[in-house]
Structure formats: C-alpha cells, structure tokens
Image (cartoon, rainbow, N blue to C red):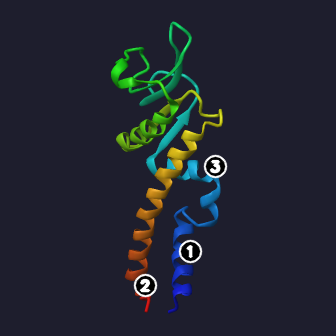
Amino acid sequence: MTIKQYEEKLEEKMISKGFGEKDSHDEEHIRKVVCKHFDLELTDDWQRGCDHYIYEESTADGYTVYVSNQNGDGDICVSDDVFYYDNDLAGEFKQAIYDYDHGDVKIYLSMLHDGEYWIDDALRDVYLELVELYTDECKDELEDEGIEEPKLN
C-alpha cells in the first residue's frame, strides 16, 4: 500500500469519527465535535446548575474584569477567580472542559456569541488534542484490520 492510499484510508476513518481534514477549518464543526466528545453544553443563558461560569463584571470604579469559577452564587475568591485580562480565559475555559469530563456538563459563557477570539482558540486547541487522540485510535484500527502504515524510505 502506498503512503497516499494509507492516508486516504486514515482520513476515511477520521471522517467517520468527525475529525476529517475538510471540516477541521469550520469553527462551528469544531465546537460541535468538542461538545459531543465531552458531552458538553455551552450556554450564554444565566442559570443555576452550570458546572462552570465564565463572565464579565465591572469593578466599582468602572474597570472590566472577568470571573471564572465553579459556582454562580457570587462566592468569588478574587485571587483565584478574577482576571484582569481576557487572554487568561482560554486557559480557564480549556481547564474547565477537562476538569468536568464526566458527561452532561454545562458551562456558562456570558460572551459565547460575542465573537470572542479566546473561545474559538480554546476550542481549537482542545480539538487539535482530540485529533491526535483519534489519529492514534484510527491507526490502531487500521492495524487491527491488517493495514500497516507504510514506512518512509
């Protein structure tokens, strides 16, 4: 089997799992696949019972800060839960996704539909990690089917 044929077989397997190359550039597809894998729901509707909350607040003197914590009851630890810059939120979001990898998880993101770059960046990072995981899984499946990965000369 040629390298090209092997890569085509691998891509077929990846597509069947939702991780094909063609869809890897579609932000909506990435969000859907990550949410499906982690049994995750993202919402911008404030409600009790979410597993994690990430939202924007204003300080008494008018500055914007960002809060990331596990409860929506206002019990906030300033040194752990409050961020001055939104560039810290991607890491918080990714950590929340991994921390709650137990199924039926809901994360509140007040800025979910505001076009925030860090949300898509975090989802893309998680997606790329899942691509690595599923690539290995698909290669193992191909090997189990008797299809060996060609060696480069």
Which quadrant of the figure contains the C terminus?
A: bottom left
Name which quarter of the figure residue 140 lies in. bottom left
- The image position of residue 99, as x and y in percent, is 35, 40
Please tell me whether mark 1 or mark 2 is closer to you in this view: 2
Q: Amino acid at mark 1?
A: Glu
Q: Residue at x 56, y 32 (%)?
A: 43
Q: Amino acid at mark 2?
A: Glu
Q: Is disc 3 placed on a helix, strand or loop? A: helix
Instruction: Report how far apart the C-alphas of labels 3 and 2 lie in the structure.
Output: 32 Å
| Pointers 1 and 3 in contact (C-beta within 8 Å) | no
Query: Quick check: 124 above or below 90?
Result: below
| Pointers 3 and 2 in contact (C-beta within 8 Å) | no
> 28 or 95, which is in the foreground?
95
Q: Earlier in the sequence, mark 3 or mark 2?
A: 3
Q: Which residue is mark 1?
A: 12
Instruction: Report how far apart the C-alphas of labels 1 and 2 lie in the structure.
Output: 15 Å
> 71 or 66, which is in the foreground?
66
Q: Which residue is mark 3?
A: 28
